[in-house]
Image (cartoon, helix red, strand yellow):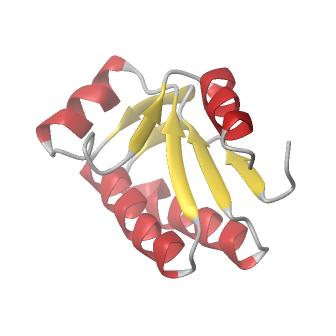
Amino acid sequence: MSSDVKILKPNGILDGTKASQFRQDIVALVEKGAKIILIDFQDVTFMDSSGLGALVLALKGVRAAGSKLFVCSINEQIKILFELTSMDRVFEIFENQEKFLEVIIQLGQ
């Protein structure tokens, strides 16, 4: 896997108490030169609007830096949150890390 690809795996409940740190973690990856960031939600049990807001703000920063952000392994609750807010149209969502890596390898990243 390319060193330009970084994977972030938040865990637990992603709400207002963790949202700021979550966003900062993503920004830090961009600052370290990550061109592609995958947020793996496998270990996140719940995400509220604060977590989603942090993700959207981080996406803006990632795009402004010329990088890309993807998500994978979302549970049913996060899927519903994305669908209700139409964020499923904004973010490219992969079933899991393996599916993401297959696509990245095919793209020659």
Relative height, residue 81 to residue 2 (above, below): above
Residue 11 lies in what quarter of the image?
top right
Compare residues 45 and 1 and report the one nearer the observer: 1
Q: Number of numbered discs present?
A: 0
For the point 74% across and 50% down, which residue is it?
109
For the point 58% across and 23% down, which residue is it?
96
Relative height, residue 84 to residue 22 (above, below): above
Relative height, residue 15 to residue 54 (above, below): above
Left or right placement of residue 61 versus residue 100 in this view: left
Q: Outermost residue, left direction?
A: 84
Spot occupied by residue 95 in the image (x, y as percentages of width and height): 50, 21
Spot occupied by residue 85 in the image (x, y as percentages of width and height): 15, 45
Compare residues 39 and 89 and report the one nearer the observer: 89
Compare residues 105 and 11 and report the one nearer the observer: 105
Relative height, residue 104 to residue 96 (above, below): below
Spot occupied by residue 25 in the image (x, y as percentages of width and height): 64, 64
For the point 74% across and 52% down, which residue is it?
6
Spot occupied by residue 32 in the image (x, y as percentages of width and height): 79, 74
Compare residues 80 and 50 and report the one nearer the observer: 80
* Quadrant for the N terminus in the image: top right
Left or right placement of residue 51 versus residue 39 in this view: left
Residue 28 lies in what quarter of the image?
bottom right
Left or right placement of residue 8 versus residue 68 in this view: right
